[in-house]
Amino acid sequence: MKQGADLRGLVGYQVQRAHLLIDTDARAPKAARALSPAQLTALILIRDNPGCDQTALGRALSINRSSAMKLVNILAERGLVERRPGRDLRTNALWLTAEGEAKVPVMVDALRVSDARMTARLSAEEVRTLSALLRKLGPVPRAASAD
Amino acid sequence: MKQGADLRGLVGYQVQRAHLLIDTDARAPKAARALSPAQLTALILIRDNPGCDQTALGRALSINRSSAMKLVNILAERGLVERRPGRDLRTNALWLTAEGEAKVPVMVDALRVSDARMTARLSAEEVRTLSALLRKLGPVPRAASAD
DNA sequence: TATTGTTATACTCTATAACTATA
DNA sequence: TATAGTTATAGAGTATAACAATA
């Protein structure tokens, strides 16, 4: 189908399509991986920021506290993450379990395969550029509250 | 929060975040706009491809027939799109109504404002580059069926 | 046999609102 | 007052599986 000038000028349209590409591809071998790309992303964030709290995790994922909570529940149920006492009595500190530490590298490899498939038509240089530009998007000046 | 090498290397993570930025911003003034960015995108596609059928629309949006159907229902209920007889008896031809034609430009302007807000930290050149690179993503070599 | 539209159903993800405990 | 976690509830968006009509 034809994409007119309006659509080509809207970054949001391209982002929307790209997002669905993740869904239909990387999320497909569900049973094998057992975690969605977004869930694995959360796992990686916790590994790279040990002891972080749920609210900070939510911010990093652009989701609110309540959604972050559900996400952590799933990871905890699967024995990949545990909640430990945090810096004060309100706060949880999130840590990977031994099982989580062991499994992350394997799952990251699998995710990288589908990520590479999605970017197959781009050079390594273009992938770097794309990633850098996406990172520069938002948060939006106006309100930006995810809560 | 820290983004380790794994995450920086995964385009999918950035896309996921960018997608949520659209949600929390552009979708916010709901009552005023009355269409989500994705719905407006569909409207634009129909305008730019008059007489297209639902399945083609779905492909352009990377969603399947059933989801495309729901989308068209919403647009039709609001009097923006109509189904006319298509090229054969199985097929609908999608056309904007007079009201749809009149309203699209206004809504596109509104969407462009939030799109601009999302890309506020990028130069015009960077926006073009980003858009072009996103367009080069997928469809995935392997299966790619959205149905 | 394959394709289009359609319907019914279910699932995932996220949001909102309210509550509790703590700061 | 503000913040972290929690819970219940609701909504949007998409998917799957079936069916009828048509090609």
Image: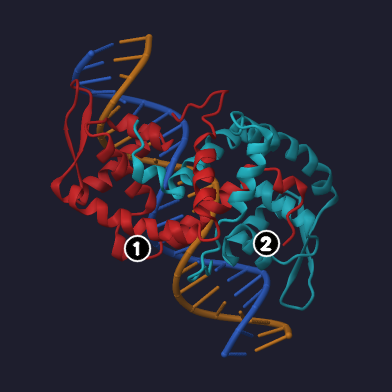
Chain colours: A cyan, B red, C orange, D blue
> What residue would you read off at disc 1?
B30
Q: Nearer the viewer, residue B130 or B84?
A: B130
Kind of residue sitting beneath label 1: Lys
- Is residue A48 rendered to the left or right of residue B134? right
**Location of residue B72 in the rendering, given as x and y in whole percent from the top left corner:** 28, 42
The percent coordinates of residue B21 (x first, y second) are: 51, 57
Q: Residue at x 35, y 42 (%)?
A: A5
Q: Which residue is mark 2?
A: A57
Indicate the chain on which mark 1 is placed: B
Label 1: how many residues lie within 10 Å, few (<14), some (14-19) or many (20+)?
few
Residue drawn 33% across the image and 34% down it: B57
Q: Secondary structure at mark 1?
A: helix
Q: Nearer the viewer, residue C9 or A111?
A: A111
- Please report the residue visible at 53 percent of the width from the left and 70 percent of the height from the top: A145
In depth, the one of D12 and A146 nearer the eye is A146
Q: Quadrant of the N terminus of chain A?
A: top left
* CB-based contact (under 8 Å), mark 1 and mark 2: no
* Label 2: which secondary element: helix
